[in-house]
Image (spheres, rainbow, N blue to C red):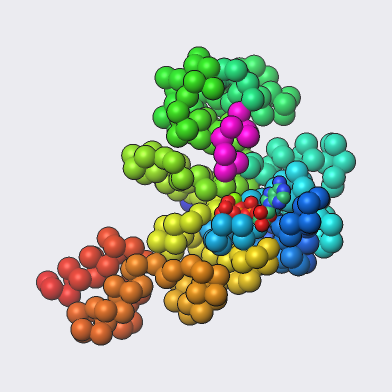
Amino acid sequence: MRRVDACGNENGGVDAPCPALLEFENVSFTYPDGQPGLDKCSLTIREGSRNALIGANGAGKTTLFLHANGLFRPQAGMVRYAAHPIDYSRAGLRRLRGEVGLVFQNPDQQLFSANVREDVSFGPLNLGLDQKTVRERVDAALDAVRMSGFADRLAHTLSFGQKKRVCIAGVLAMRPRLLILDEPMAGLDHAMRKELLSVFDSLYGQGITLLLATHDIDFAFRWADRIHLMAAGRCVAAFDAENLADNAEALEEAALPLPDIIGLRRHLVGTRALDDSRAPRSVPELLDLLMQRSI
Ligand SMILES: Nc1ncnc2c1ncn2[C@@H]1O[C@H](COP(=O)(O)OP(=O)(O)OP(=O)(O)O)[C@@H](O)[C@H]1O
Ligand SMILES: [Mg+2]
């Protein structure tokens, strides 16, 4: 597949760091009942990259996402999108939400139309697109999440995983520049997780920036370019995924485990079954290395 470039441009230096697309600068937010949501959180998402946001329950991941598309407004600090502070006017938010798609953790929070096709059409219709374009986009989005056969179903009669797929389709149909997904894999079966991963790969191939929250550290390690770690409302660390092992202490403080593959690699290096210079990020990668050694 054609890779545009790491920053989503036709041309440009792949080696140069891509510009920041979304920036949080010392953002703080407390819920009306006094619960702290975000505490001076700073974070940068670069254009064209795959980002995993990790953190224990209650760390602030969802709260951060609600700030990213302007649903919540910081009580202190600032959120910038494409180098500009978010414009919280009605028109500004409309523009922002045309570019920043957010898939909620709980699909029941997102679905509001009776019928699946209507639900997925809502965003593109709101962008002012003509009926034919909307139909094409909705068909493509439903196809991407393997829900084409459900277009005429009533949304509330779908299973949890099916609802989640419709929500993802609704955001895909907007053709966002930044796609944010709150635990997209949770509740999906094995086949759908695989399908969804190939959807992400294809979006990434088109230069779309991806940011997703996950509790699956093994997945974050093998999939992401960059990992952002949250704990108690703070954005405590951000690092390239390949450097995850160097951040073991920060993970432990945030009550998160190291990926299984890191423990396995350590063991294999200890028994000299694997060369110390190799750092596989997935089981297939590790098997490949072991096969190469045994040839
Ligand atoms: N509507 C709300 N009212 C009051 N407090 C809230 C509300 N929503 C979240 N919180 C609190 O804000 C903090 C951050 O919650 P948030 O939902 O952002 O965490 P999270 O990292 O997404 O967790 P999870 O992994 O469970 O989804 C938690 O302490 C939570 O109890
Ligand atoms: Mg959450």
Foreground residue, 45 or 108?
A: 108
Q: Residue furthest top?
A: 152
**Is residue 106 rendered magenta in the image?**
yes
Q: Residue at 61% of width from left, 28% of height from top?
A: 111
57 and 23: which is toward the camera: 57
Residue at 27% over, 67% down: 286
Q: Residue furthest left?
A: 295
Count of marks overlaid on the render? 0
Q: Quadrant of the C terminus?
A: bottom left
Q: x, y percentage for residue 157?
A: 49, 20
Q: Position of residue 183 (x, y in %)?
A: 52, 48
User: Residue 285 appears at what percent x and percent y?
Assistant: 29, 64
Q: Position of residue 158 (x, y in %)?
A: 47, 24
Quadrant in the picture for residue 238: bottom right
**Please, is residue 192 above or below residue 270 in the view?**
above
Asked if one can make out residue 24 in the rendered structure from this viewpoint, the answer is no
Rendered view: 288 above or below 265: above
Residue 224 in sight here: yes
Start and end of the magenta stretch?
104-111
In depth, the one of 221 and 41 nearer the eye is 41
* Left or right: 30, with 140 as reference point: right
- When the figure is inspected, residue 42 is found, relative to residue 204, above or below; the finding is below
Image quadrant assignment for residue 270: bottom left
Position of residue 293 in the picture relative to residue 167 (left or right): left
Q: Residue at x 56, y 35 (%)?
A: 107
